Image (cartoon, rainbow, N blue to C red):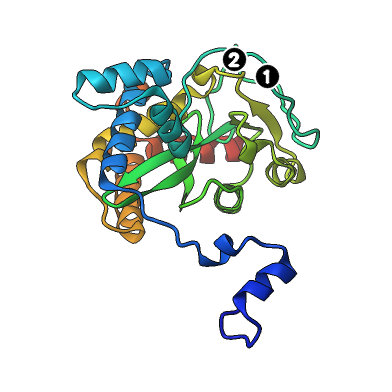
């Protein structure tokens, strides 16, 4: 909006646009190495203790020798998109356009591909920064159908991944997410409705409602992300692509009797389509 090559002074441009002059001169500062290390450690602790809030995480970090307060832990948790799992009071009203849908999977037997898809977003640490990973998972086979990386928590990269999954694999009967603003937005729910997909959402604070995606995050982080300090976003893209190919096609899954997600998805789906 501010044109520094224009003959009109920057101060005057700010006045016309009703912007603070600080906005025109501000330059973002990179996240320090110390904060990045803390964010990564908080992420690791959250995977092991999802019920831990800012106070408990502060105490755990202090045991490890970190001098840190609760407010700073809370700030870093917000930055990484991490929140403790517990039933929260209804302290704020949602935007009326963001409808929250009921959880449809309780006591439901899910044994075939494309019956239920689930999705979520997680924080991925790098050597000098971080990105967010969104993935679409087939519930029955545990196969990752599509995924995207982004440096911001927006809705567009989630929609791109869902569109790719639908284009390549058809549509599920039910799509389950948590109650994050990306998933309650009209853009996201509208995409699912346009394809006749039933929308299911986790109960508030009920991480077990989407436990298979949570388990996927743990596998990705302990078997890939924490073993590599990605230098760039492209390096993270390549590393995750390599791991998710291994996860889908090679890695035996205990819940699938030692079969791979890709094997279960590919073996069962054609039989279902033929029977139909």
**Residue visible at 39% across and 56% down in the picture:** 29
> Farthest residue in the bottom direction?
7
Q: Quadrant of residue 44?
A: top left
Mark 2, Cα crowd under 10 Å, few <14 / some 14-19 / many 20+, is few
Q: Nearer the viewer, residue 62 or 162?
A: 62
Q: Position of residue 7 (x, y in %)?
A: 63, 88
Judge whether 108 appears above or below 185 on screen. above
Q: Is residue 264 left or right of residue 161?
A: left
The numbered disc on residue 233 is: none
**Residue visible at 28% across and 31% down in the picture:** 41
C-beta proximity under 8 Å, tags 2 and 1 = yes
**Residue visible at 57% across and 17% down in the picture:** 109
Q: Position of residue 180 (x, y in %)?
A: 60, 33
The residue to which callout 1 is attached is 91
Q: Secondary structure at mark 2?
A: loop
The residue to which callout 2 is attached is 88
């Amino acid at each position: 909006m501010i044109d520094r090559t224009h003959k009109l002074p920057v101060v005057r441009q700010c006045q016309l646009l009703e912007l603070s002059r600080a906005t025109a001169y501000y330059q973002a500062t990179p996240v320090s190495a110390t904060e990045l290390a803390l964010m990564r450690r908080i992420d690791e602790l959250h995977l092991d203790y999802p019920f831990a809030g800012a106070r408990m995480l502060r105490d755990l970090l202090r045991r490890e020798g970190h001098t840190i307060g609760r407010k700073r832990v809370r700030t870093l948790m917000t930055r990484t998109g991490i929140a403790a799992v517990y039933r929260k009071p209804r302290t704020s009203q949602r935007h009326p356009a963001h409808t929250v849908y009921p959880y449809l999977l309780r006591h439901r037997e899910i044994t075939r591909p494309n019956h239920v898809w689930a999705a979520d977003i997680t924080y991925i640490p790098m050597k000098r920064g971080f990105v967010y990973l969104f993935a679409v998972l087939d519930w029955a086979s545990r196969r990752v159908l599509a995924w995207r990386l982004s440096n911001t928590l927006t809705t567009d990269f989630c929609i791109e991944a869902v569109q790719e999954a639908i284009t390549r694999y058809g549509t599920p009967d039910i799509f389950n997410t948590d109650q994050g603003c990306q998933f309650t937005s009209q853009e996201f729910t509208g995409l699912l409705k346009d394809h006749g997909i039933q929308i299911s959402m986790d109960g508030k604070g009920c991480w077990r409602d989407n436990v298979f995606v949570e388990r996927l995050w743990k596998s990705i982080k302990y078997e890939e992300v924490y073993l590599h300090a990605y230098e760039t976003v492209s390096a993270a893209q390549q590393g995750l692509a390599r791991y998710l190919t291994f996860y889908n096609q090679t890695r035996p899954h205990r819940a699938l009797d030692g079969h791979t997600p890709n094997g279960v998805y590919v073996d069962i789906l054609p039989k279902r389509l033929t029977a139909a």
